[in-house]
Amino acid sequence: MNTVVPDTAIANVEKNGFLDIELDPSLDLFAEIEKLKKEKNAVLLAHYYQEPDIQDVADYIGDSLGLAQQAEKTSADMIVFAGVHFMAETAKILNPGKKVVIPDFKAGCSLSDSCPPPLFKKFKEQHPDHIVVSYINCSAGIKALSDVIVTSSNARVIVESFPKDQKIIFAPDKNLGAYINKVTGRNMLLWNGACMVHEIFSLEKITRLKTRHPKAKFIAHPECEEPVLRLADYIGSTTGLLKYTETDDAMEYIVATETGILHQMMKASPNKTFIPAPPTNNCACNDCPHMKLNTLEKLYLCMKYELPEINMEEELRLSALKPIKRMLEISSQAGL
Ligand code: 13P
Ligand code: SF4
């Protein structure tokens, strides 16, 4: 049951992607969000790249695979997805009976945007003997053109589930694709897409930082470019990176991924030091501008008014569902 939304606010969502309603600054948003969760039987799923306040109020924090698994199995009536659009869209594809809301509808993804479905369709038609393996960071339109979806935590297992001579197109992340080619000895054809956050790390600055912190381990997400990955002591998804810092015995880590993950790393290992890997410019470019569009205020408003909501045509949903289900099946067989 959604609270009546003022007409101006609806127009506002359509224009800006979020509810721009002024809030009383003395409102305890943490308590209000907890109240709304109970009232509406809502589950709050958040990605590790969300701001710390959002992570602290979430019911589940995870990587793309964990979030998809949670979205599929939840019995809540409403899924509040604190992440980017393709993640919330995946939740809706998997669990269409639930209302799925996102704090800011315009929280997109540069990697997903680098692969428009009409162009990709043409590319696929030029390689009819290839199957399509797509990284989950893509639109429903790309998922619908794919044979199987992967995330950074199951890409290797899924690619290896195909015969070695199977011809494969991998989209849209050329860096993850190149990394999987390297570790599996495959030669997948790569779509030329990349993540703006993971491409920004400076090899030179990381090298300097490693010299200054000789005992620090350097850990990186596979969306980073190959020269950066070559320096890494460990490469993994956000969950993989977090687990590594929990179980490994080093006391210092240089972390090459979006800065949001450091919040959980510091919480899990308060006696260890975590240094965000430096970007090329003196900017905060290792903060994802899309992920960081979501704020606690927008989160509260989207739960209260149940807007913006994710919806899609049933035909598209069903086509996109097949390769996601295949991913979840292979992952569960592999114990992931
Ligand atoms: P994972 O959390 O699955 O590692 O993905 C990282 C990412 O870039 C999400 O947008
Ligand atoms: Fe997309 Fe990169 Fe942001 Fe992840 S970090 S949402 S891949 S732009």
Image (tube, rainbow, N blue to C red):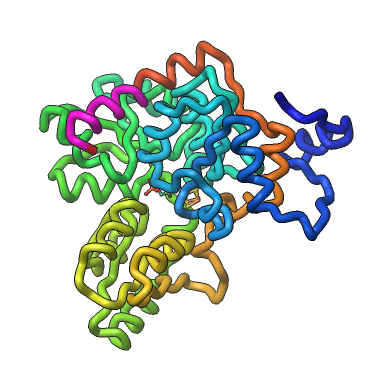
Q: Position of residue 46 (x, y in %)?
A: 50, 46
Residue 285 highlighted magenta (yes or no): no
Q: Say if 280 sits above or below 305 in the image.
A: below
Q: Say if 7 sits above or below 256 in the image.
A: above
Quadrant of the rendered image containing residue 236: bottom left
Q: Say if 203 sits above or below 64 in the image.
A: below
Q: Position of residue 177 (x, y in %)?
A: 29, 44
Range of residues picked out in magenta: 324-335
Q: Position of residue 62 (x, y in %)?
A: 40, 47
Taking the image as shown, residue 74 lies to the left or right of residue 65, namely: right
The quarter of the picture where the N terminus appears is top right
Circle count: 0
The quarter of the picture where the C terminus appears is top left
Prevailing secondary structure class for the magenta stretch in the rendered image: helix
Taking the image as shown, residue 264 lies to the left or right of residue 30, namely: left
- Residue at the farthest bottom position: 212
Residue 325 highlighted magenta (yes or no): yes
Q: Identify the residue shown where x is 81% and y is 51%.
A: 23
Q: Identify the residue shown where x is 69% and y is 32%.
A: 306
| Pick the front one: 294 or 182 | 294
| Pick the front one: 68 or 124 | 68
Taking the image as shown, residue 4 lies to the left or right of residue 198, namely: right
Q: Position of residue 5 (x, y in %)?
A: 82, 31
- Residue at the farthest top position: 315
Residue 227 seen from this side: no
Q: Identify the residue shown where x is 23% and y is 46%.
A: 180
Q: Identify the residue shown where x is 83% and y is 36%.
A: 9
Residue 247 seen from this side: yes
Quadrant of the rendered image containing residue 226: bottom left
Quadrant of the rendered image containing residue 277: bottom left
| Pick the front one: 266 or 222 | 266
